[in-house]
């Protein structure tokens, strides 16, 4: 089955829709999840479901922990000890306003969304390259910039791939700073009598009077996750939105939302488990998994520059069908590269 892509421009953001199958050799679902690093909220919706399976519930409860460190000097992230202890690969990417950039004395590049008057710059530091060249002039200059020239401090969220004992190591490593452990917030609920769009896995763009399109589904999901009224009652002054047609009413649907700093590997496990949901016959024809990134993250996917002055959205959504077909929807804001 070939992967199809459909681009749709809507005001202030770009939506990319495609369909494939999880068994397809060229399916890129895992790569896309693994390269979307800064995940703030994960939600999944299962129609015709009242009780979450033990396997799914265990995964949901094991999405943490993550940590916050306040007023952490930037130079702590380029020390040889920190890189050797915690960093396996990756870059330190800074999104700086013009004055701060000039004060650092470092080499960077103008933001591609600066316009005629450049007001923002991007600085990238390859941490692994630094760790192998601690005696280089480049390393000395970066240390001088972070420690003396412009000693920046930030509040950080930290998370990492679990290998055993890092939790205690991280707490002790930053014990001189305000470090705090957090667990993601988990909201579980059953939605009764939910009106759902009718979907056909082969009809990404929908079919007149037979099936709704992928963009219509994404709009509907946003309303469901926001707990908006979907009946378009005349006395409702908050929302006039209603479920797209054709639709069907399910007796109940299970909704789970996880909020925090969530690693891609945790989302991969959730996606795999949702794919296995249809190993046994189910009433639900499809389930969804939606992921939102932090609005102020300096990147969206991989190292793609991300801006948030006009919204900050970067998100993706999987619609998983009972035949292992899937739809993938990706959206970014106006100051972003096209989703990968």
Image: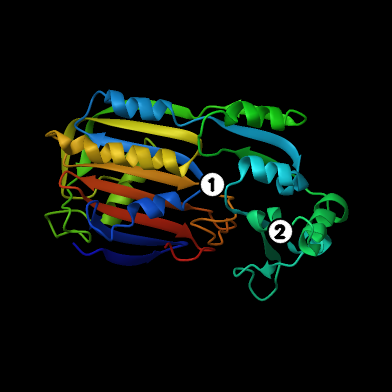
Identify the element where label 2 is drawn: strand
Residue at position x 55%, y 49% from top? 295
Q: Look at 79% across and 49% down and name the residue there.
A: 152
State the residue in front, 254 or 23: 23
Asked if residue 253 is positioned above or below residue 27 in the image, the reply reads above
Q: Which mark is residue 323?
A: none
Of 283 and 67, nearer the camera is 67
Would you call the spot at circle 1 few (<14 residues within 10 Å), some (14-19), or many (20 or more)? many
Q: Residues within 10 Å of mark 2 (few under 14, many from 20)?
A: some
Q: Closer to the N terminus: mark 1 or mark 2? A: 2
Left or right side of 269 for 21 = left
**Disc 1 from disc 2: Cα separation:** 17 Å
Q: Locate the C terminus and report the quarter of the image it occupies.
A: bottom left
Residue 230 visible, this angle: no
Which disc number belongs to residue 294? Answer: 1
Residue 27 horizontal/vertical position (percent): 29, 57
Q: Position of residue 304 (x, y in %)?
A: 53, 62
Residue 29 x/y as whole percent: 33, 53
Where residue 100 sits, quadrant-wise, is bottom right
Name above or below for residue 221 compared with residue 102. Answer: above
Viewer-closest of 183 and 256: 183
Quadrant containing the N terminus in the rendered view: bottom left
- Image disc number at residue 96: 2
Q: Please give the name of the residue rendered at 67% of the width and 46% of the height, measured from the top-left corner.
A: 83
Left or right, 146 with reference to 182: right
Residue 8 position in % (x across, y down): 35, 65
In the displayed structure image, the side of residue 122 where residue 306 appears, left or right: left
Q: Is residue 199 visible?
A: yes
Direction from residue 233 to residue 307 in the image, left or right: right
């Amino acid at each position: 089955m070939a992967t199809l892509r459909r681009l749709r421009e809507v005001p202030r953001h770009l939506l990319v829709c495609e369909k494939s199958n999880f068994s397809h050799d060229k399916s890129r679902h895992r790569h896309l999840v693994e390269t979307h690093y800064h995940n703030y909220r994960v939600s999944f919706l299962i129609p015709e479901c009242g009780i979450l399976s033990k396997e799914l519930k265990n995964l949901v409860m094991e999405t943490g922990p993550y940590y916050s460190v306040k007023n952490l000097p930037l130079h702590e992230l380029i020390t040889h000890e920190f890189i050797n202890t915690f960093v396996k690969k990756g870059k330190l990417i800074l999104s700086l306003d013009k004055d701060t950039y000039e004060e650092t004395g470092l080499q960077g590049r103008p933001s591609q969304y600066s316009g005629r008057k450049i007001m923002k710059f991007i600085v990238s530091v390859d941490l692994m390259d630094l760790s192998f060249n601690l005696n280089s002039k480049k390393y000395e200059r970066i240390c001088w910039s972070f420690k003396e020239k412009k000693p920046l401090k930030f509040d950080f969220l930290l998370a990492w791939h679990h290998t055993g004992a890092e939790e205690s190591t991280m707490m002790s490593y930053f014990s001189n700073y305000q470090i705090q452990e957090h667990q993601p917030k988990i909201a579980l609920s059953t939605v009764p009598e939910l009106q759902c769009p009718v979907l056909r896995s082969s009809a990404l763009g929908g079919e007149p009077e037979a099936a709704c399109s992928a963009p219509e589904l994404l709009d509907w999901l946003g309303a469901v996750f926001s707990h908006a009224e979907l009946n378009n009652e005349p006395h409702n002054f908050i929302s006039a939105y209603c479920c797209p047609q054709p639709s069907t009413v399910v007796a109940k649907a299970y909704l789970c939302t996880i909020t925090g700093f969530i690693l891609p590997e945790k989302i991969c496990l959730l996606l795999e488990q949702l794919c296995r949901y249809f190993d046994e016959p189910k009433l639900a024809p499809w389930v969804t998994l939606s992921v939102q990134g932090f609005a102020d993250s300096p990147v969206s996917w991989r190292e793609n520059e991300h801006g948030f002055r006009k919204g900050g959205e970067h998100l993706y959504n999987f619609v998983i069908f009972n035949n292992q077909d899937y739809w993938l929807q990706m959206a970014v804001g106006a100051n972003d590269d096209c989703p990968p």
